[in-house]
Amino acid sequence: MQVRRIKVIGVALAMVAAGLIGTTPSFANCAAGDVFQGFAGGAFANCGTNPQTFGWQHQRAVQRIVCANCTTNGIAGVDSGGQSGLADAIISDDGTGRYTANYSWGNFGPDGCILIASEPTVSACTGTATTPGVNNFVIAGQDTTFPNLARAAVLSVDLNEPFQFWVLDQAGAASVDGDPCVGDASSFIVGDVECGVIPYPAIALSAGAPGGSTLTFHVDPLADTFPILTDCEVAHDKATNCLGPADDKRNLLVGRQLLFRRDSCTATPADRRSYNIPPSPTSGTLNATRVWTPYAPQDLNLNGVQDGAEVAFVPVTFAGRDELSDTLPDSKDVFVPFQSGASDCVYFAIALQLDVNVIAPGERVLSPLVSINPIPVSADQATPVSDRVVNLVASKSAGKASVSWDTTAEFATSGFNLIGTKKNGGSVQLNSTLIAAKKGTTGEGASYTVSLSSGSLKGSTAVYVEVVKTNGAKERFGPASF
Amino acid sequence: MARNMNWKSWVILGCAVTILLTSGGLVLASNMGFKINKQIYPSWLLSGVPKRDNWISIPYNSPYADAKKLCTAFGTTAAGFTIFQLNPATGTQLVNYPCSLSTVVALDAARGIRIRNTSTVVPIITNGVLVGSSNEATSLPTILGGFLVAGAPKKDNWISVPYHTTWIKAEDVCVSLGMGGGTGNIIRNNPDPVATPNAISHPCGNTTINNFALVIGEALNVRKTTAGDIVGKLPPHF
């Protein structure tokens, strides 16, 4: 009797176990959902190096939090989490710097399931009432010529209902027959999506203010060359979800967000990401780390957190592409508080802020890379550091040597000398005539590269850059070893 | 030396030669036997899916008529080692069998089989030797059309691929099934946790996008978005 009871219990337990396993979903993050690019051979072009991407369900991203297994509408939103670029195979490089996006929401890493929230309309193509909605995608890379600038492209596509996946090539495509279930479903752009520049925040003026300085930032709308492409000409939801302005029908661009980062005064921050988003954890949630923080003048200790007696932060954003639609630089006076005794500097940058009409818990998205103003602002003085050399690099190979550096704001710079130093302590000037300043007294920074033959190093193993001021004073920076 | 070999050695040698010739793509007898040492990635975690989801094919003629026999082939009776087949009509399990059971649950050799191994029983199972041959009369399971993202995994048609298939790339499957552009996609899942991405999807009709090479011993997921089922398709093979 007891043996039989044990057998019955054993079988029951086994059935329970099998039943539990049977309820396990096939995919953790999302049961489905592929995103393709390249239907007409196109890719992302001229996006620079070190590309980073971010994909999200329209209006429902939470970029700053990733979760382990988000299949419900939680605090981590619906976005692509730590999967962000070439290393994650979200995009691939064809070897010429053209990037193609092909990924699946079913892969580990996306921290939200795009099936969490469906469009409220019944599909005209399939007749189903639960149709996943719009996916947005932003790619950003580092400009190869001007590495402080980011290049970006923003795409937005609805689910291609006949295909049942998202086709990024439909962003920018023209209508063929007005029917998203037939001809328009197969309408793709021909050619590449060309990335364009995210402008940087130029410091046009610096003036004293109680407790700090007022910096006047200019952001040039003529430098706004990044494209925003939607599939609003061919999408199923064009009547309900394409109501934005003609050049941004999905209301993607909020504006250009001013960001800051505190760092060493001697080198421009190398990390150009807006966020450092960690891989999805095995359980629970993880917060992303802000590499660059939205700048708010109310942040009196410049730590990015409202604390002490600080009032609510109002981050600085330059609205849209051109606030006054006048093609002139958008201008804002921004208070920067003194950080008395601080030896570090404050750097400013611009990221694109995206997705205007978010739905809770969704939040606005920042472009994955930022454009940096390389001129450091002294945290102690709250003014741009002037007439200094930063990012000094020396190199030597195959009988040639090279010295490169950047300058902070040139207000009183006449030119530069290169001073070589030898192992025995001696020094020698390597240039025969003064290297002229590019900006001199304009308050702008510049980049310099000087090539030398190995012979002209005269035995030098390292080099200083000597700034010659307009009043004749000299100041040395370095050294950098060859 | 040949005289010292017993009949078992000859069988093993024959199998090895068969595998070598098969993988070389040569045309041989259509009902050849084969043997494969199939790697299984253990330590499955829900939060890592689809990493370590081992979607495998078994031979259409094989000793694995039921799930228990497949467990035995992998040398395990662990509850954390599960044999799963998806019913694409419902999106739920057709078979979901922990190897700790002793019941007989038939397997459909033409459907893909998912193996998840969470077992910590030592030795951890990381491979199994599968043997079998083709069955000329076995067709693919009915491939259901009308896949919808919102309904997945319903109409996710995981098919078992013959070990000596003539399909080489994903687009070959599309062509063979009569699936042109805009009719669906073919998905492979690479269980290797180091691989990125794990799920690779090829849209039929476009050879420039993810036209991946098939891997012997792996199953494929066919998503047909257009209406109409594909019934009684015999998979091509050497």
Image: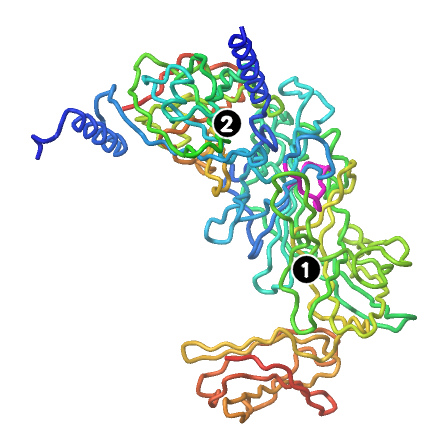
What residue do we see at 36% from left, 20% from top? B235
The residue beneath circle 1 is A371
Mark 1 vs 2: CB contact within 8 A? no
Membership of B222 in magenta stretch? no
Q: Secondary structure at mark 1?
A: strand
What residue do we see at 69% from left, 77% from top? A439
Residue B80, numbered circle: 2
x, y percentage for residue A18? 54, 18
What residue do we see at 76% from left, 42% from top? A363
Left or right of A466, for residue A262: right
Q: Is residue A156 visible?
A: no
Q: Magenta stretch: give its range.
A: A55-68
Q: Is residue A470 visible?
A: yes
Q: CA distance from mark 1 to mark 2?
A: 50 Å
Q: Residues within 10 Å of mark 1 (few under 14, many from 20)?
A: many
What residue do we see at 56% from left, 22% from top? A21
What is the three-letter code of the residue carrying label 1?
Ser
Residue extending farthest to the top is A1
Looking at the picture, does residue B94 appear above or below residue A442?
above
